Amino acid sequence: MNRVISYIDGFNLYFGLKDKGWKRYYWLDLAALSADLLKPDQTLQATHYFTARIRLAGNNHVDQQRQDDYLDALATRDNLQIHYGHYLKKTRECRKCKATWPDYEEKMTDVNIAVQLLADAFDDRFDTALILSADSDLTTPVRFVDERFPQKRIIVAQPPGRNSSQLRQAATAAFQISQTKVRQNQLPDTITTAAGLTLERPATWN
């Protein structure tokens, strides 16, 4: 069987769904989605999810709780590992009135994906890498793996509403994740963790 590892760019996927207005699909089972994207002769070895926890700022505690519940729900899935980046505080300025305000920018996701992809390639953990992203910053590590390990395949599954021609051209093949795939691979509405905590799909995600 052809061994596959999936690498999921959490924010790229999230904003793709958001731009489409598909909030009802945020409660996404990433391991199930990855498996559903495989061909019959392929088997999923692992799913790596790359994200960053929302920083509490102002009135975003509800958003933070929704993300916490989702991450805790994902942690119950078999063979899925979550990798965390962080947010960097930046100061934004209005060009017209010169007013300033604090903002936060997510960092480390593309670096973390690149490091994990390269480590898995060198350790021969996959025959095919499935990258769920349309971030052109991943083009360099994809090209490196293709050049260093020509027998390995790198497939780019671009999130809905996202597109990077540069990343697509660097990969062995590429396609767009369909609405059907994200609709069919939702987590159960209610999940109980090993510690007995009950998690529910946020009402605003219905």
Image (tube, rainbow, N blue to C red):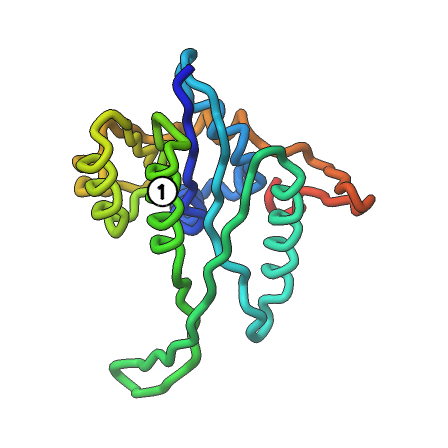
| Residue type at numbered disc 1 | Leu
Residue 97 sits above or below residue 143 on the image: below
Position of residue 98 relative to residue 83, above or below, is below
Q: Nearer the viewer, residue 122 or 185?
A: 122
Q: Residues within 10 Å of mark 1 (few under 14, many from 20)?
A: many
Q: Position of residue 191 (x, y in %)?
A: 73, 38
Q: Which residue is mark 1?
A: 117
Q: Residue at position x 47%, y 20% from top? A: 43
Q: Is residue 174 left or right of residue 58?
A: left
Residue 102 point in image, percent of width and height: 43, 79
Residue at (36%, 42%) from the top-left corner?
117
**Residue furthest out toward the front:** 123
Write down the quadrant of residue 139 in the picture. top left
Where the N terminus falls, by quadrant? top left
Q: In which quarter of the view is residue 80 placed?
A: top right
Q: Position of residue 27 (x, y in %)?
A: 58, 40
- Rendered view: 32 above or below 197: above
Q: Residue at x 24, y 33 (%)?
A: 149
